[in-house]
Amino acid sequence: MVRIFKCSFCNQEIEPGTGLMYVKNDGTILRFCSSKCRKNMLNLKRVSRQLKWASKVPAK
Ligand SMILES: [Zn+2]
């Protein structure tokens, strides 16, 4: 069984076998479709709603 996860940053579905997983110190698991999303969330602390390229898929 392969579960499909959504990118924690841009909310797009991540193809099984691709993407990145990041575990924060508090145990929260973040999944990213690309290093671009990971960088934006962790290094730049951006909010995806404020980015044109990341806001095409509406957040739930
Ligand atoms: Zn993403």
Image (spheres, rainbow, N blue to C red):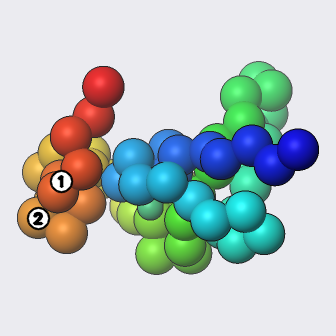
Q: Residue at x 78, y 69 (%)?
A: 17
Q: Residue at x 71, y 28 (%)?
A: 28
Q: For residue 41, say whether it is visible.
A: no
Circle 1: is it few (<14), some (14-19), or many (20+) Cα within 10 Å?
A: some
Percent x, y of residue 49: 17, 45
Percent x, y of residue 60: 30, 25
In the image, taking residue 33 as reference, residue 21 lies left or right, namely: right
Q: Which residue is mark 1?
A: 55
In contact (CB < 8 Å): disc 1 and disc 2: yes
Q: For residue 48, say whether it is visible.
A: yes
Q: What amino acid type is highlighted by mark number 1? A: Ser
- Name the disc covering residue 52, or none: 2
Q: What amino acid type is highlighted by mark number 2? A: Lys
Q: Residue at x 70, y 72 (%)?
A: 18
In the image, taking residue 37 as reference, residue 60 lies left or right, namely: left
Occupied quadrant, residue 44: bottom left
Question: Which SS class for mark 1?
Answer: loop
Mark 1–mark 2 Cα distance, whole angstroms, equals: 5 Å
Q: Residue at x 79, y 33 (%)?
A: 25
Foreground of the two, 44 or 50: 50
